[in-house]
Amino acid sequence: MLQVHNLIAGYGPLTALNDVSLSLQAGARLGVFGHNGAGKTTLLRCIMGAVRPVSGRVEVDSNDTCAATVADNVRRGIAFVPQGHNVFPNLSVEQNLRIAGLLFDPSFVSQVYELFPVLSERRQQRAGSMSGGEQQMLALGMALMTRPKWLLLDEPSTGLAPVIVRNVMRRLVDINERMGVGLIVVEQNVPATLKVVQQVVILRSGQVAFAGSAAELAGNTDLWKWF
Amino acid sequence: MEYVYGIIIIVGLYVVLATSFNLIIGYGGLVSIAHPVFFALGAYTSAVLSRDFGVPVLLAMFAGMVVAVVASVALTLPTLRVSGDYLLIASIGFQLGLLEVIKNLRFTGGPGGFTNIPPFLIRDFGRESYVILVLAVTIAVVLLVRLIARSDYGRAMSAMRDDEQAFASVGRDAMWMKIVIFGLGSGIAGFAGALYAHYYRFITPEQFEILQSAAILTMVVVGGVRTTWGPVVGALLLQALPQALTFLHLPPSVLGPIQGLLFTGLVLVFMFVRPQGLVPAENVWRDRTPRSRTGEGG
């Protein structure tokens, strides 16, 4: 279970998150939407331990992730695919996956190849020479190599063609259904994300403006003004 | 024969210095020029402890290594939190500052240097024993760095160099890895410094100044960054050439400038003609056996 309790966080005098709370069951799929600067990425970074909150806490299976480092949280089962900077461009696909799995189970790479056949076909290719969509698949594969319980994604569709976005989103559902990995997806592409997630949160100026089901948001276009 | 032994020892020590510097700047991607100051810390610690406090030389040598490691952590902890450029700036300040401190302390001998350092092994077993010791340390250091570079840790280092943020997102702590790499490289330099001090038995701050940084950097660049044999070749070449020039029997007023021109010329030639150095960088992934794991070669 992942619980965010009254989280307040910011950068110097700027408050990015103001009393944000949410609760997710294991294996849940959450979409986080909002304008630029609404606090979406800060929420992910707080959960990962990359930003220390002013107050509040994030608990994953009773562990306070805000008090730990990013590396500790990854080892505890929280994987993060940041926007950009998510693969080692000078290493091959296989080397990327092996590096990601060094602390975990390197043999899991076969299941990653099964989930992403394109990675298996290109295992010798330098990651930096692959297309944006393929790099995103590789980043997802690397995150899976850490055997996560939760997968946090920061705008995974950025810079991708619509057909590739659909492919990435389908893979996210596969990951959730096959492996039971919970998803928290921060996105600007709301229509594509609503096909993947079950729950949604809309952030507005660091506060939760709406929390409900994906179906509710899909049916209420009045809410769409907030992102 | 003593002359030959002296050359072997100084070449061996420079191979150790260049190899340990390659670990920091090449494999670790940490841009620092303060390597000679860790060499100095090892030399001075071992010399002071053994001469003035009666500590057995071998123990004093290891103490020199420990002091170099502690000093490296003191340098890296505050600077690595920001970015690589800060480490470079801090390393320049650290080197200049620490040498000034050494110059102004009475117990280090000040600018005049520290003399009468107790010898090690030579009195009991002859000069050959020290040559064997230095060669053994040199081989051990070269093999250790090679082993690290080709291990999973070495591959993780190459990934960290590629992208720190991606490195953190696979559960690795880049900061900790940098401190370990820097500490290990500096500790090795400290031990080399101790070996230097107990052979030459006289050290001055001038021996560890910024020209030494340039010399060690040139050895690594000319030999080949991120290679096992590059720093070895670089150290051999840049130590052997000046020695060879002495056989020309030129007056010192001519010999000095010729050596300077030679070093500068070599760096320029390598920058334009062969920037990868004499020995090309090796693939640290080569020896792995991914076939059994993935069903295909890696």
Image (cartoon, helix red, strand yellow):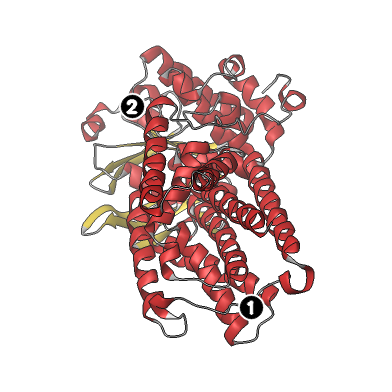
Left or right: residue B63 compared with residue A186: right
User: Callout 2, which amino acid?
Assistant: Val
Q: Secondary structure at mark 1?
A: loop
Give the spatial CA distance, label 2 vs label 1: 75 Å
Q: Callout 1: 10 Å neighbours few (<14), some, many (20+)?
A: many
Q: At 55% from the left edge and 75% from the top edge, which residue is drawn?
A: B45
Give above or below for B10 relative to B275.
Answer: below
Residue A55 occupies quadrant: bottom left
2 and 1 marks on the same chain? no
Specify the subunit that label 2 lies on. A
Closer-to-camera residue (A18/B188)? B188
Disc marking residue B106: none
Left or right: residue A96 compared with residue B135: left
Which image quarter is the C terminus of chain B in?
top right
Which residue is identified by label 1? B118
Q: Secondary structure at mark 2?
A: helix
Residue A171 in the image: state x and y as whole percent.
Answer: 52, 22
Disc marking residue A190: 2
Residue A97 appears in the picture as rendered: yes
Closer-to-camera residue (B191/A22)? B191
Specify the subunit that label 1 lies on. B
User: Callout 1, which amino acid?
Assistant: Pro
Which image quarter is the N terminus of chain B in?
bottom right
Closer-to-camera residue (A143/B242)? B242
